[in-house]
Image: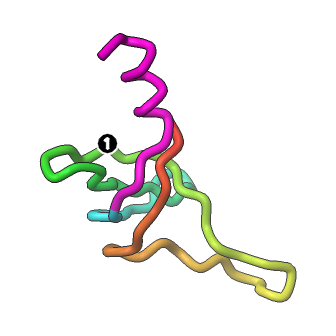
Amino acid sequence: MSDTQRLLQNLIAFGTVTETKVAAGKMLARVKVDDDRVTDFFPMLSKNNSNNKKATPIKIGEQVVVLC
């Protein structure tokens, strides 16, 4: 497989949240994307809408999409 093909395949990954924390006012999460690969902590978008006054945090075990 060429480097270009590998890079394109790694642009979007699906995974499961394994750990969360809040630092400097940002919600951070670690995501298990393969059987043997877990990401470092990175910022997460939270669910919210105009009727909600508070954001709903991501929960451990939720499935997410990781954009690289």
The image quadrant that residue 1 belongs to is top left
Nearer to the camera, 24 or 39: 39
State how the image is colored: rainbow
Which residue: 79% across, 78% down?
49
| Residues drawn in magenta | 1-15
Can you give x and y, in whole percent of width and height, for residue 40 in the image? Answer: 31, 42
Which residue in the structure is indicated by mark 1? 40
Farthest residue toward the front? 1
Farthest residue toward the left? 36
Q: Using residue 52 as the reference point, say whether residue 16 is left or right of it.
A: left
Q: Residues within 10 Å of mark 1 (few under 14, many from 20)?
A: few
The mark total stands at 1
Q: Using residue 39 as the reference point, say whether residue 45 is left or right of it.
A: right
* Amino acid identity at mark 1: Asp
Q: Using residue 50 as the reference point, say whether residue 21 is left or right of it.
A: left
Farthest residue toward the bottom? 51
Q: Using residue 23 as the reference point, say whether residue 25 is left or right of it.
A: right
Label 1 secondary element: loop
Nearer to the camera, 59 or 25: 59
For residue 24: magenta?
Answer: no
Can you give x and y, in whole percent of width and height, for residue 55 in the image? Answer: 65, 76
Which residue: 71% across, 76% down?
48
Which residue: 46% across, 62% down?
64
Can you give x and y, in whole percent of width and height, for residue 50 in the image? Answer: 86, 80
Which residue: 30% across, 50% down?
33
Can you give x and y, in whole percent of width and height, for residue 42 in the image? Answer: 44, 46
Q: Is residue 17 above or below residue 49?
A: above
